[in-house]
Image (spheres, rainbow, N blue to C red):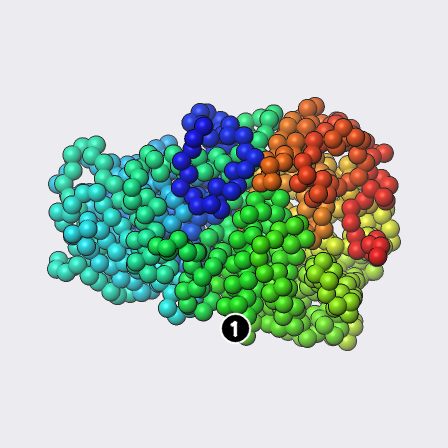
Amino acid sequence: MKRKLFVIATVLSLCAGYTGKAATQSENTPVDYVNILMGTMSEFPLSHGNTYPAIAVPWGMNFWTPQTRKIGDGWQYVYTDYKLNGFKQTHQPSPWMNDYGQFSIFPMTDRMEFDQEKRASWYSHKAEVAKPYYYSVYLADYDITTEITPTERAAVFRFTFPETEKAYVLVDAFDRGSAIEILPEKNAIIGYTTRNSGGVPENFKNYFVVQFDKPFQYKNVVKDGDIKQQGNKAEANHTGAFIGFSTQRGEKVIAKVASSFISYEQAWQNLKEVTEKDFETVKQEGRDVWNEVLGKIEIEGGNLDQRRTFYSTFYRSTLFPRKFYEIDAKGNIIHYSPYNGEVLPGYMYTDTGFWDTFRALFPFLNLVYPSVNVEIQQGLVNTYKESGFLPEWASPGHRGIMIGNNSASVVADAYLKGLRGYDIETLYEAMLHGTENVHPKVSSTGRLGHEYYNTLGYVPYDVKIHENAARTLEYAYADWTIYKLAKALNRPQEEIDRFAKRSQNYRNLYSPEHKLMRGRNKDGSFQSPFSPTKWGDAFTEGNSWHYTWSVFHDPQGLIDLMGGKKEFVNMLDSVFVMPPIFDDSYYGGVIHEIREMQVMNMGQYAHGNQPIQHMLYLYNYAGEPWKGQYWIREVMDKLYSHHPDGYCGDEDNGQTSAWYVFSALGFYPVCPGTDQYVIGSPLFNKMTVHLENGNTIEINAPDNSKETRYVSGIRINGKEYTKNYFTHDQLINGAKIDFSMSATPNKTRGINESDFPYSFSNEKE
């Protein structure tokens, strides 16, 4: 059947191999299961996701969201709030990073009210429809229904007004420097906003155009709160514009909106995504695109809540990183550089923190949407050329937050998984550069402490570099990914050996006394006193119980340090046996990540933050995979739901969601850079993954249930399979995987070392 898709070739290419079942306007297509309000019941002291309802297309440049709180509040939509004050174009990746390039649109009647609190209207979730491709809400104080449907760089609003002589629409360009102009001859408002939270050059602007289908009877600009009676222009700290008209009851007014980081001319060009289309057409196209993207994985079995949770997390896994490029009038790919302020050719993506997303989100793209990651890798080449560094946290440019050098993992895993079509030599050069340098203005980019790490083999605890043990562990893993890529690129042997050696630097922090990782002083002594439950300090948003497992590339080496498989498993078990006690003295109070661990009643296991999320799969490396299967299902069953409180911590740009999607499939990429996915416990009776190359992965677990969480046997393409992992080639070549599930663990499967996943210590040249 035919489908109209507005998205350019990138998304169209994703459709290869998809059956088309999800694209019809019938019940129970993938997008119908999605709850975009999942995770929105969050506050500063406790996160249930720290998400907002992103009304968007996959990886779209612009998202839209209803706004319940003031300008500048990172918690821009909170489920428990009662009033809305705007419909906001947002680029916010998380409340901790806040927003940039934002403005809002808001209808009202009877009066022009600019103040956010005074203009806010009561609303109810009972009169709210929230879909990825469509949002509708009733503004009770004004008797207005507002609807939104988006494209990549544009959107269409539909306002249904009551009968009134004074129907108004406000365009709020926000504070910290903005401009607005009313163009009556075009029934349009144009303007720009400069509001941002960092990571932008001095010339940063987001230019917007809003065009209505109804002539203006009223028009007023706003300058720093003063509603002007004369003039069509304003430029100030905080500007806005009101336009108005008389309406009949039930009259619908359309506003088409687009924006550009390049120019007004380009904003008008971007508006062409919707210029010739009516509201319902754009809505249907958005629905079709989401069904194409989410339809890459079909599920059968499970209960309704599980299906809703799966597709809601799947949706979150395909939002970030977002496109930061545009298409000019000649069809060229161009972007405004958030690194040097120039308009340049080529791709650019942004709004992701690799500290979070290297773990599962990027491996998910490499498996299911490699064409998207090819564009992202091309954008990383441009980032290096424009700034001299690969990003670690980009929003939209380099941001000073988090630690590590995880761009190395993102680059290496993509190439080693077979992605091509970009300049890998330049990316490898960028990786090497990052091991010897730190960004002069953004210390989280590059490697802070590299001088110590490269000479001593660790970042010392006593040289005033915070989170030093976490840096050491992450640098060691990054060095392993460089080692693997260096081998694939046939780099000089000295270079290969150097990074192989550095990948073992994790050993320098191992404390035999505690069987845990521990900060180490410059003179070689361990930090003292040492509290394994102390959050922060030597670690990042976690404690030693969380970070000790950050030896993704060499679990066998960690097993050897701990004294063998039995001791290793005992330490894994201890994570859950210990009470959720904590030492918050480094922070001077309980941060939300600590509270989220405490209230989950899983001991020291802190799934609400990323460092420990792979740990459940490590039982596979020590011959007791059934223990991992038990805990993986516990986490999926207890710590995720599709409700507004559906996450157990920050969702973090798709990482916590991608963990669920992978785990539901029955495997997880413990070590990006290997070709392996470590086996867990599949959630559904059947799952089918439609790959871009036309092949399919069919995962069958017909006797699966909440009680039968244990894997008693596996067959691949009809043959018995004993290993504790699948390989990338097995999957992308197409595979029929049959799981036999049981209510009791099979303690004879996966116990032989020949069946264990990759560890560097076992690597044979």
Q: What kind of element bears circle 1?
A: loop
Q: Is residue 36 left or right of residue 558?
A: left
Percent from the top left, x then y, of residue 143?
24, 36
Taking depth in this image into account, of 238 and 81 the one nearest to the observer is 238
Taking depth in this image into account, of 399 and 273 the one nearest to the observer is 273
Residue at 37% of width from left, 32% of height from top? 126
Q: Residue furthest front?
A: 330
Q: How many marks?
A: 1
Taking depth in this image into account, of 550 and 723 the one nearest to the observer is 723
Residue at 51% of width from left, 50% of height from top? 320
The answer to which image quadrant residue 478 occupies is bottom right
Q: Quadrant of the C terminus?
A: bottom right
Q: Is residue 555 left or right of residue 351?
A: right
Identity, as a three-letter code, of the amino acid under mark 1 = Lys
Taking depth in this image into account, of 350 and 39 the one nearest to the observer is 350
Residue at 61% of width from left, 53% of height from top? 420
Name the residue carrying label 1: 441
Q: Is residue 136 left or right of residue 412?
A: left
Percent from the top left, x then y, of residue 732?
66, 40
Q: Quadrant of the N terminus?
A: top left
Note whether 178 is above or below 637 in the view shown: below
Percent from the top left, x then y, of residue 596?
59, 48
Query: In this view of the protein, can residue 762 be seen by the observer?
Result: yes
The answer to which image quadrant residue 19 occupies is top right
